Amino acid sequence: MVGKILLFLPFSGISARLLGSARQAFHCLPTFLYFCDQLSLYNLNMAIQNGLKAPEFTLFSSDKKEVSLTGFAGRKLVVLFFPLAFSSVCTAELCEMRDNISLYTNLDADVVAISVDSPYVLARFKDDQHLPFQLLSDFNKDVSTAYNALHETFSYNMRGVSKRAAFVIDREGVIRYNEVLENPGKIPNFQAVQDALQAIE
C-alpha cells in the first residue's frame, strides 16, 4: 500500500528516496521486534528475582472472595502455582502441603495456591482434598504471566496453563525464594521453601 501511494507523488526523486526508506524500515522490523521481545523477557525475569518486590495480584478464591497480595502485608507467604486441579501431580503436591501445613503455621507463614482453573473447579478440588489453604483462580492468566510461570503450550495442545512454581514472600512483600519448574512432573523443593521461611525474621 505504501508503494502504491508513493507512485502518485509528483517528484520521482522524492518518491524513490521515500520508498527506499520504507524498504529499509521494513527490513529492520524483524530485528526491532526481536529486540522488543528480548527486552520484555528481561523485564519479566527481573520481576521474579530474589530481593525484588513480588508482583501485586488480586484474584478470586475458591470461596469467590477477592484475595490480594497486600492483604498478607506483615506476614510470610508461600505462593504456589500449579497447572491443573485434579491432575495427579498437582493433587500429590497440594496434599503434601496439606499434610505438612503445621510446619508452615509454626513458621508464621500463610499459603496460597494459584492455577488457571475457574473458582468453581477450585472449590470442588479444595473440598475433595480437604485443603486448608486458599486456592486462587488466575483464569485470565495475568498473574502467572507476571510471575513468569505460564506454559505457552501444555499437554493435549492446551495453551496458557500455569507452570509448577513456588515463591516465598517476606513480610515486606519481597521475594526471598523462587523456583519455577519447566517440567510439570516435578514438585518444588519444599525443604528449600521451609529454609527460606526460617531465614525470615
Image (tube, rainbow, N blue to C red):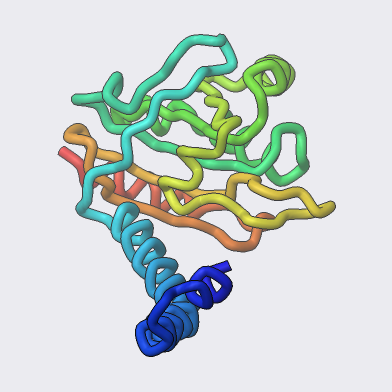
> Which of 146/102 is in front?
146
Identify which residue is drawn at 76% across, 40% down. 87
- Decide: is 100 above or below 176: above
Q: Which quadrant of the figure contains the C terminus? A: top left
Is 14 positioned to the left or the right of 80 in the image? left
> Which of 164/143 is in front?
143
- Decide: is 185 above or below 13: above
- Decide: is 13 above or below 98: below
Q: Position of residue 121 (x, y in %)?
A: 71, 22
Identify which residue is drawn at 38% across, 74% down. 35
Is 49 positioned to the left or the right of 158 in the image? left
> Which of 175/25 is in front?
25
> Which of 82/147 is in front?
147
Q: Which quadrant of the figure contains the N terminus? A: bottom right
- Decide: is 64 above or below 55: above
Is 15 positioned to the left or the right of 150 in the image? left
Is 200 positioned to the left or the right of 182 in the image? left
Residue 34, picture quadrant: bottom left
Q: Position of residue 31 (x, y in %)?
A: 44, 80
Residue 25, picture quadrant: bottom left
Identify which residue is drawn at 44% across, 26% down. 102
Identify which residue is drawn at 70% across, 33% down. 85
Q: Position of residue 138 (x, y in %)?
A: 55, 32
In this orientation, does residue 16 appear?
A: yes
